[in-house]
Amino acid sequence: MRFNEIKDKLFEAANQVKVKDSHLLLHDINEPAISHRLAMYLTPKFTDFDVDCEYNGNIDAESGRKYINLLITEARALGLINVDAPPVDNGPDEQIINRPVYPDIIVHKRGHNGKENNLLIIEVKKSSSRVNGQWDALKLSRFTSKEYENDFDYCFGAFVRFDVGNRQPDFNVVWYKDGQKYNDRNTA
């Protein structure tokens, strides 16, 4: 599926949240409620895929669960591990740990990995969140790249920030591809 088609479907679904579920945005309701509604509107738009919230299964992992590999220094900087935690010895390279993850929304084919099956990963944030979104951005980067032996092969990632508490709720999207922010303005 081409990027513009994916982009259009996500924007249509986010607009549906904005219009049909404005109560959630106006009253700054919990983020999972907003994510659920977005996933609900995405489902009929991706008929050949499954749309899941907080899905942590990974057919290729020994544990059967999703986790991403990241540098200990990154994890400490994001407050994901205790600064005083003992280091893990991974040899001469910088030390890598794995961290369990539960993506807000994924568009995929359950039980399969690879670009043909893992289409889109979405992280949702509200403008009122006290969390700055750096961890979400790192997840999107890792899920769309093979850096540090992450091997999910998601075609695209999307960071969707809903503006809440205003009479005119809105949203914006930052895209990810191949582990980097993706400028969607220059695509066909």
Image (cartoon, rainbow, N blue to C red):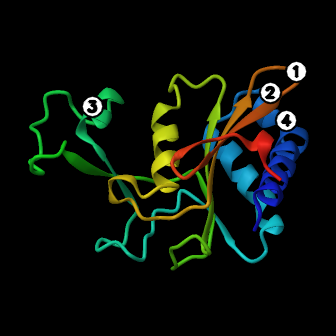
Estimate the spatial distance between the alpha carbons at disc 4 and disc 2, rounded to whole Å: 6 Å
**4 and 2 marks in contact (CB < 8 Å):** yes
> How far from the left and from the top, in percent, is residue 179?
51, 48
Q: Quadrant of the N terminus?
A: bottom right
**2 and 1 marks in contact (CB < 8 Å):** yes
**Residue hosting label 4:** 22
Crowding at label 3, few (<14), some or many (≥20) Cα neighbours within 10 Å? Answer: some
Which numbered disc covers residue 76? 3
Estimate the spatial distance between the alpha carbons at disc 2 and disc 1, rounded to whole Å: 6 Å
**Residue hosting label 1:** 167
Crowding at label 1, few (<14), some or many (≥20) Cα neighbours within 10 Å? Answer: few
Which numbered disc covers residue 62? none
Residue at figure coordinates x 47%, y 64% from the top left: 152
Which numbered disc covers residue 26? 2
Residue type, numbered disc 1: Arg
Residue type, numbered disc 3: Arg
Residue 177 to residue 73: above or below: below
> How far from the left and from the top, in percent, is residue 151?
42, 64
Which of the two residues, 30 or 182, is positioned nearer the viewer here? 182
Which of the two residues, 88 or 91, is positioned nearer the viewer here? 91
- Name the secondary structure under disc 2: helix
